[in-house]
Every structure is written in C-alpha cells, then in structure tokens.
Image (cartoon, rainbow, N blue to C red):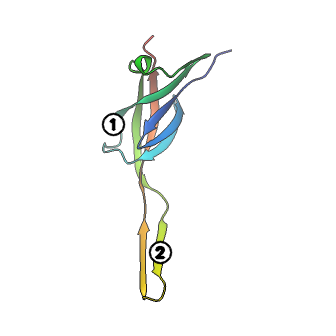
Amino acid sequence: MGFAVYAIIRAGGRQHKVAIGDVFQADRVQTGPGETVELPVLLLVDGESVTSDPWVLAGVKVTAEVVDHTKGKKIDILKYKNKTGYRKRMGHRQQHTQLKVTGIETGK
C-alpha cells in the first residue's frame, strides 16, 4: 500500500495542501497560461515522514502549471454614516489564477 505524498505550500499569502495533479485557485500570478511556476514549501509529507525543517525544505521543489486566470465572486461594500448623508457603494472582484501541480521533487 503506497502512502500519499503531499505538501503545504504558500501561494498568494495563503497556504494550500497540494498533491500531484491537484488544481487549486491562488491569488493572481503574473504569468501566462501554460507557463510553470515554482511555489515555496512550508511542510512536506512523504509517506510516513513529515518534514518541516527549513534547511531540508530548501531542497524541495513544488512546480505548478498555470491553467487559467479567473475572477472571484463579487463582494459588495456599502459605507454609511448616520445623519450626515454620507453613503458610498463599491464592489470588488478578486483576481485568481488556477494552478495545476505538476511535480513535487523531494531531492532524494
């Protein structure tokens, strides 16, 4: 029985649990579709061993391919101050990039 190899990576200020073949959304990455990016690793689970030592993780590489650029759902922002007539309405759609993990190189 084989054990799963996965990693906790940092992408766009957030942490994601990824394995080979996973597709996930991160904040916008400034590369085009089809290009590859390398993501920093915070924790690696390789079979039964768990590695979080920064010196060991310096040799670990997680590569991902940019699949597509999308936008998140719209967030409505309403500001109001009582008795002054101040009202402000804004909206925001976060820019996302879909990444597909193509490899986790453990350096072994």
For the point 49% across and 39% down, which residue is it?
Answer: 15
Identify residue type, mark 1: Glu
**Along the line of sight, the residue nearer the viewer: 28 or 54:** 54
Q: Residues within 10 Å of mark 1 (few under 14, many from 20)?
A: few
Left or right for 16, reference 31: right
Asked where in the image residue 60 lies, by quadrant, the reply is: top left
Left or right for 87, reference 31: right
| Residues under numbered marks 1 and 2 in contact, where contact means CB atoms less than 8 Å apart | no
At numbered mark 1, what does the secondary structure look like: helix, strand or loop? loop
At numbered mark 2, what does the secondary structure look like: helix, strand or loop? strand
Whether 88 is drawn above or below 44: the answer is below
Q: Which mark is residue 78?
A: 2
x and y, in percent, of residue 23 in the image: 50, 39
Whether 37 is drawn above or below 71: the answer is above
- Determine if residue 22 is in view: no
Residue at far right of view: 1
For the point 43% across and 76% down, which residue is it?
Answer: 89
Q: Which residue is mark 1?
A: 35
For the point 42% across and 88% down, which residue is it?
Answer: 84
Q: Earlier in the sequence, mark 1 or mark 2?
A: 1
Q: Kindly report which numbered mark, 1 or 2, lies closer to the viewer in this rendering.
A: 2
Left or right for 69, reference 15: left
Residue at far front of view: 83
